Structure formats: structure tokens, C-alpha cells
Amino acid sequence: MNRRKFIRTTAAASIALGLGSWKNPGKTHYLSLSFDDGFKKSFYRTAEIHEEYGLKACLNVIATGHLPTFNTEPKWIPQHLLGNFDDWNAFKQKGHEVMPHTWEHLNLTEIPFEKATSNLDKCFDYFEKNLEGYDASKAMYNFAYNASTTELEDYALKRVRAVRTGGWLVLGDTMINLVNTSTAPEHLGCWSHGPDFCNNYVETEINKFLKGDGGWLILNCHGLDNEGWGPMSTSFLDKLLKRLSRIQSLSVLPTGMVLNEVYG
């Protein structure tokens, strides 16, 4: 199955990294729980739970989600549940990671290239103007629906450090081994599950990951309880992070922070 066909048929991807290049020798496994869309209630609770265990949340928000005119995917992303940049700046001040997750949550592979790149530019411009401390050189762009093309990824990478999307994305559609290299990946993949609760899926994937020799697993999440596509229950997230925070060989970090810790 080729890369683009794979992306169209699944919203999943992950990366396994060789341990030889990592700067923190005490860690063999990195996990990023990457929460999308910007559900206000869910994101505040997600951040609070992370804080309880000394962790930082990975929060990806829609640039226009706070505007009354936003109406993309009302079934899964109702506008009245979304927060605004006052909320996102409050998270940033507490040290959580806030990254761009599209201009208006369109599948950029299904619209003309010119409109798609215009959406990217408007998203990046808005974050630069409205998110305090936004640093494009350390930013991660998270494609809506985990859908992209090589051309769209390359265009986004002119404005950000890395992109997150679907499929096996680094070094040609395969799990990669970065032993003895200091080159940071620019194309990151993630696994996701929905539209029902993702608790069992997340538990299964993390347990399989922890049994392996090491690497980096990115799981794409959304809201908590009944908010969003493929939600996670609040009680599950709390118990999960409590357990994971006790594993010495595991680092639970947002995607951008993993890149900074591993590659600088």
C-alpha cells in the first residue's frame, strides 16, 4: 500500500526511533498524547490532570475555532464547546504546549492547492499574532483529519519545524532507525481511534509500545468524556498518567518538547 493510499484509508501513524541518538540516556521510550481541536472544558481538565503528575499537555487548537462563524464538523466540533486564545495563552503560561491545528479544520487534500496553502498561511499568521511566545522555529503543524500531501507538508515546513499527519511518514513510509544521527525528523505520524471512546485502544497501543525496546509513539486524542471524535474518559486519563508517570524509562511529553529534548 503506498503512502497516500494509506493516509486516505486510515487516520494512523507512528514513529520508532533508534535509541543511539537520544540525548537523555535514562529514557528509552517517549510518548506524546496529542490532543486536537480545542475543547475548552476538556482541555482545562486535560491540563489539570497532566499538572497533577508533573507533566505538560500537548494541545493543538483551531485558529478560528473561537469565532461564532466557525461551523466545520458541527457534529464532532461544535463551536460553543471551543475555547479562545485567552485560554490558549493561559495554558502557555503554565508551560503546556499549544500548537496550530488548522485554520478552519478543512481536509486540505480535498480543496484546491491554492486555497489549502492560503489556509496554512492564515493559520500561521494568526498564531504568530495571537499566541504568546509562539516560536515558528519550534512549532508543529497538526493537519486536520491527519490528511496531507507531500506538497502541502513541504509548504507548511517553510513556516514550522515539523508537521504531524497520518501514515508512515519518515524516510519513506517505514519505521525509522535514527541511530548515530542528529537530524530531527520533520514529518511525524500519529495513531488515532474513533468515533467511539478511545480508552481501550490507547491502553492497548501503549502497553504494546512499552513492551518494545524503545522509541517514540504519538497518539492523536481529542476531547474528554463526550466531547469530540474518539473521546477519552477523564477517569481513564487520570489513571493512565498516574501509572505512566511512575515508569522511569518513559518520558511523556508533547511532540515539540520531544524534538527539543532529543535533538535540541
Image (cartoon, grey):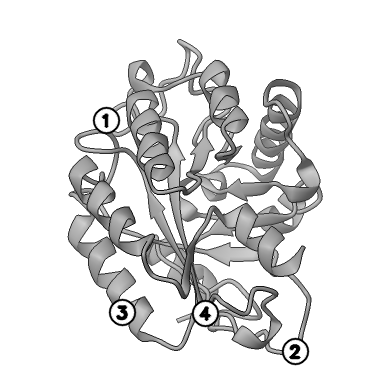
Q: Nearer the viewer, residue 25 or 8?
A: 25
Mark 4 and mark 1 in contact? Answer it, CB < 8 Å. no
Of the residues under marks 3 and 4, which one precedes in the sequence? 4
Give residue 256's position: percent from left, percent from top.
63, 53
State the residue position of label 2. Answer: 180
- Amino acid type of the residue that numbered disc 3 sits on in the rendered structure: Lys
Of the residues under marks 4 and 2, which one precedes in the sequence? 4
SS for dot 4? loop
Cα separation between marks 4 and 2: 15 Å
Tell me the quarter of the image containing the C terminus.
Answer: bottom right
Give the answer, above or below, for where 75 lies relative to 99: above
Is residue 150 visible to us here?
no
Q: Nearer the viewer, residue 98 or 242?
A: 242
State the residue position of label 1. Answer: 75
Give residue 259's position: percent from left, percent from top.
67, 62
Cα separation between marks 3 and 2: 25 Å
Give residue 155's position: percent from left, percent from top.
75, 51
Which circle, 4 or 1, is nearer the viewer?
A: 4
Mark 3 and mark 2 in contact? Answer it, CB < 8 Å. no
Which circle, 4 or 2, is nearer the viewer?
A: 4
- Amino acid type of the residue that numbered disc 4 sits on in the rendered structure: Thr
Q: Residue 28 has which mark? A: 4
Cα separation between marks 1 and 2: 46 Å
Which circle, 1 or 3, is nearer the viewer?
A: 3
Give residue 163's position: percent from left, percent from top.
64, 55
Which residue is pictured at 50% across the width and 54% down the height? 147
State the residue position of label 3. Answer: 208
